[in-house]
Image (cartoon, helix red, strand yellow):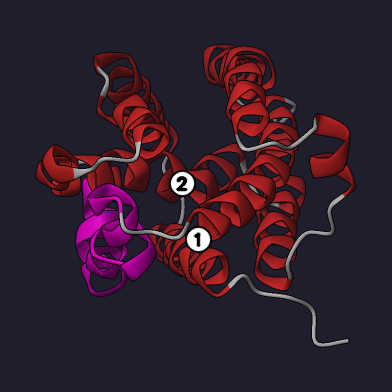
């Protein structure tokens, strides 16, 4: 079993909860209140800023050049194509980019981004990539698990958003990212227990992120 699959299997108790989170279920069915999706979009764009920074840190880590280049390619794709597409989505939701960037990250969002950046700043290249894996991979698996729900979904913006993660292009990107992690572990090794802990924490943050969006989480003061 490749290390990426092993990480998921060893954390399946948390991972499986992502697939049927109430936010995800309602989004794919089309019953999610638009204000919750709007809140999610604002928070997720700001999360993507942190993800780009984390991948840039990964690319600067000591390790094989090919791995660093791949990390930088993913950072570049997010910072250009992915975020430009997201900006079009924000416009459809009546949000300006300046408004979104000025929004305060919710507590869970802030904590998740801080976890990613801290891991990428202090950990190995492999540890950094593993910290970001649940984000990439879970969106693909959530989409595959819930695709039948889209058949009755009458909310066009939800359907278009979901279909991005069902696309062959996104699937190929996820498999490339997993293969990079598997190859690094096979060639250079590392502490599996450390990777397992990092993967588990990141998966928990993914679950918390959906809950944050559904509850439209705010700072208490």
Residues at circles 2 and 1 in contact by the CB criterion of under 8 Å: yes
Relative image position of residue 177 (x, y in whole percent)? 40, 28
> Closest to the observer: 202 or 2?
202
* Real-space Cα separation, disc 2 to disc 1, in angstroms: 8 Å
Which circle's residue, 2 or 1, is located before the other in the chain?
Answer: 2
The magenta segment is: 5-30
Q: Residue at x 49, y 68 (%)?
A: 214
Q: In this view, does 121 lie to the left or right of 35?
A: right
Relative image position of residue 199 (x, y in whole percent)? 44, 59
> Closest to the observer: 48 or 161?
161
On-image quarter of the C terminus: bottom right
Could you say which quadrant of the image residue 96 lies in?
A: top right
Secondary structure mostly seen in magenta is helix
Q: Name the residue under label 1.
A: 202
Residue 27 to residue 63: above or below: below
Relative image position of residue 77 (x, y in whole percent)? 59, 15
Q: Can residue 3 be seen in this view?
A: no
Q: Residue furthest bottom?
A: 220
Q: Name the residue under label 2.
A: 135
Q: Does the magenta stretch include residue 21?
A: yes
> Closest to the observer: 104 or 150?
150
């Amino acid at each position: 079993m490749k290390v990426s699959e092993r990480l998921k299997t060893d954390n399946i108790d948390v991972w499986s909860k992502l697939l049927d989170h109430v936010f995800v279920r309602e989004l794919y069915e089309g019953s999610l209140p638009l204000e919750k999706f709007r809140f999610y979009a604002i928070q997720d764009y700001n999360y993507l800023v942190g993800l780009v920074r984390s991948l840039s840190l990964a690319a600067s880590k000591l390790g094989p050049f090919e791995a660093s280049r791949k990390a930088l390619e993913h950072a570049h794709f997010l910072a250009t194509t992915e975020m430009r597409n997201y900006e079009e989505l924000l416009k459809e939701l009546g949000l300006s980019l300046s408004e979104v960037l000025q929004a305060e990250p919710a507590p869970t969002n802030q904590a998740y981004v801080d976890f990613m950046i801290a891991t990428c700043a202090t950990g190995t290249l492999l540890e950094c990539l593993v910290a970001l894996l649940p984000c990439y991979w879970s969106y693909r698996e959530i989409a595959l698990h819930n695709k039948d729900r889209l058949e009755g979904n009458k909310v066009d913006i939800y359907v278009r958003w979901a279909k991005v993660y069902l696309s062959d292009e996104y699937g190929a990107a996820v498999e490339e990212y997993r293969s990079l992690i598997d190859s690094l572990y096979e060639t250079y090794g590392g502490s599996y227990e450390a990777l397992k802990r990092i993967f588990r924490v990141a998966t928990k943050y993914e679950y918390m992120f959906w809950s944050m969006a559904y509850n439209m989480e705010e700072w208490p003061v």
